[in-house]
Amino acid sequence: MVHSVRMEEATGEDQKSEEEIIEEAMGLMEMGTAESERKALTLTRSISPTKELELLMLIMDKSENEIVEATATVMLAQFARKNPESTDKCVKILCDRLSSNEYDLGIRSAAATGLGELKHEGSFEALRRAFYEETEWAVQYAVLAALGNLGDTKALPLLIDALGSNISMLVQRSINSIGELRDPSAIPHLLHLVGKVDVVVEQSLAQALGSFTSYPKVVTVLREMANSENPLTCFAAEEALQSAEVVQDPDEAQNGTNNETPSMNYTIRELLERSFEQAHPPSRADRTLPLIHKEAEAEFQRMSPARQAAYKALCEHLKDGTIEDERAIAAIRLRSFPRGLKEEAVNQAGALNDPSQRVRASVLNLVSHNPTVLASVLLGDPDQNVRSSACSALVECGEMEASVLATIVAFQNDTHWIVRVSAAIALGSYAVNDKRAYDVLAASLCLKDGVPFAEGLRPPDALAVQCHAITSLGFVGNAEAIPLLDMMSRSSEVKVRLRTAAALGFLADSQSLVILSRLVEDDDGEVVETAIASRARLLEEGGC
C-alpha cells in the first residue's frame, strides 16, 4: 500500500502522530486562505487510509475555496481507487456532490471526473440524471467524458441525445465517448453527422469512426472524408484508415464487444503509439495493458540506476499525485529525460486527460516532438489555457503540416481570444512564406464601423487578435500584405498603428517606405519611434 510506504519513510524523532497531523490540518483550514487549505490537503498523504478519508471529507466540508474543494473531490476518487473497500462510500459522496447545485460548477465537474475514474456501475444513474438536469455545459462536458470512461453501453442513448446539442464542445465530447464505447449500434448516428458539423467536430467524428473500421460502410465514408476540402478532416480520416490496416480483430468487430475501455482518449493513445514506432498489438484488449516501447525501453536501459529510480518516481507522481501541484511539478522535472521516456510517461499516466488544466498544459512540453498529438489538444481541449499552451508547444515542432493546419483552424475558429493570439504568434513563427498562413492572417484584418472586428469576439479581444496578426504578417513576409497594412496604418487605435509600423520593417518594398514615412509624422511618440526604426532597417538592408 502506498500509505504504508509513506509512513515508513517518515522516520525519526520529528515524526508526528496522526492526531497531531490532523490537528495541524484543521489549524490550516481555520486560517481560511487558499494557500493554507492547499497545505492541509498535502497532509492527507502522511496518515493511514482511514484517517486520510476522514481528513479529506473534513477539508471538503470546511473549504470555501472552489479550487481546493474541487481538488479534494478528485483526490477522493483517487483514494477510492487505491482503497477499494471505500469505493461505495466515496461514490455516494461524489454522486451527492454532482447532483447538488449548492456546489460550484468546478466541484460538480470534479465529482463527475472522479466518478469516471472509478468506473463504478452504481454511478451511471447519477451521471445520467446530472446530464439532463444540469444547466452548466462545463459540468455536462465532464459527465460525457465520465460516461466514456465507464465503458457501459447503457450510456449510448444519452450520448446520442448529446449529439443534437447546440454546444459544439458537447457534441465533440459525445462523439469521443461514443468512439470509446465502440458499440456498433452508434454507427448510423455518427454517419448522420458527416458533412453537418464544424471543422473541429468533424475531425473528432473521423477519429471516432476509426473505432468501427471493420464495417465496410464506415470505411467508405472515411475514404470520402479523406478527400474532404477540410485538411484536418482529411488528416484524421487517413489516420483512421491507417489504423484499420495495421490492427483489426475480426471477432471483436463482428460482435461489437469491448471488455475494457482505456482511460486515455483512444485516438490520442493510438497517435502516441504510432509516434514511438511501436507495432500495434493484435487485439483491442491488449491495448489496455501497459505499453513497452522499444525506444523508451532502450533509453531507460542506458540510464544509471539512480536516474532510472528518479524517472520511475516522477512517473508515479505524474500518474497518482494527489494534488495538481505534485503532478505538474513531476511533468516539469520529466522534461530533462529523453524524448521516448517523456512521451511514455505521458501515455502511461493518461496525463493529457488529467482533470487539472495546469497539469495538461505542463505535460505538453513532454510531447513537443509530436505535432499530431499537440494538434489534437489544440483543437479539442476544453480549457483555453491548455489550447494556448499547445500552440506554444507546436512552435517547438517547427513548420510541419499538422502544426500549420491545426494552428490555422484554431486561429479562425477558436472561441477564446487568447488561443487566437497564440495561434497568430505560432503562424508568424513557423509559417514563413506560407500562403495559407498569409490568407487567414490577412482575412482577420477587418474593421466594422471603424472598430477592429474578429468573428465571434468582442471589440477589445478582437483588437488583441488583430495586433498579433499584424505582427505575424510581418514575419510571414508576403508583400501582398502591404495594402492591408496601409489600411491598418490609418486606424484610430494606437496599438494597431504601432504593430503596423513594426511589421512593415520586415516587408522590403518601396510602398512600405511610403507608409512608414507617413507614420513618422504620427501623433503618438511610440509609433513615431517604431516607424523610424523600421524605415532604417529597410534602408540598411537595401531591399527596397
Image (cartoon, rainbow, N blue to C red):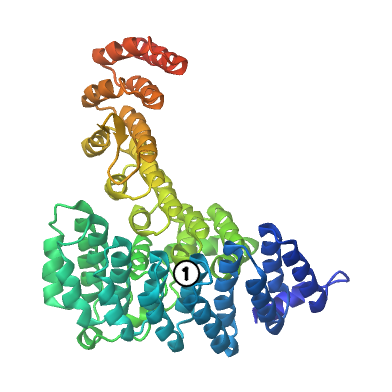
What SS does tag 1 mark? helix
Q: In which quarter of the view is residue 332 placed?
A: bottom right
- Camera sees residue 314: no
Q: Is residue 333 left or right of residue 409?
A: right
Q: Residue at x 37, y 25 (%)?
A: 493
Q: In which quarter of the view is residue 40 placed?
A: bottom right
Front in this rendered view, residue 409 or 456 = 456
Q: Position of residue 473 (x, y in %)?
A: 30, 30
How many residues crowd mark 1 within 10 Å: few (<14), some (14–19), many (20+)?
many
Q: Is residue 310 left or right of residue 180?
A: right
- Camera sees residue 449: yes
Q: Position of residue 139 (x, y in %)?
A: 42, 68
Q: Where is the C terminus found, in terms of image quarters?
A: top left
Q: In which quarter of the view is residue 58 placed?
A: bottom right
Q: Residue at x 49, y 61 (%)?
A: 341
Q: Position of residue 167 (x, y in %)?
A: 30, 62
Q: Position of residue 456 (x, y in %)?
A: 30, 46
**Extreme right residue here?**
13
Q: Say above or below: 30 vs 97.
A: above
Q: Where is the N terminus found, in terms of image quarters?
A: bottom right
Front in this rendered view, residue 4 or 388 = 388
Q: Say above or below: 476 vs 64.
A: above
Q: Is residue 474 left or right of residue 242?
A: right
Identify the residue under disc 1. 109
Front in this rendered view, residue 118 or 339 = 118
Three-letter amino acid code of the residue under disc 1: Ser
Q: Residue at x 75, y 70 (%)?
A: 26
Q: Say above or below: 35 vs 243.
A: above
Q: Residue at x 40, y 52 (%)?
A: 387
Q: Is residue 203 left or right of residue 470?
A: left
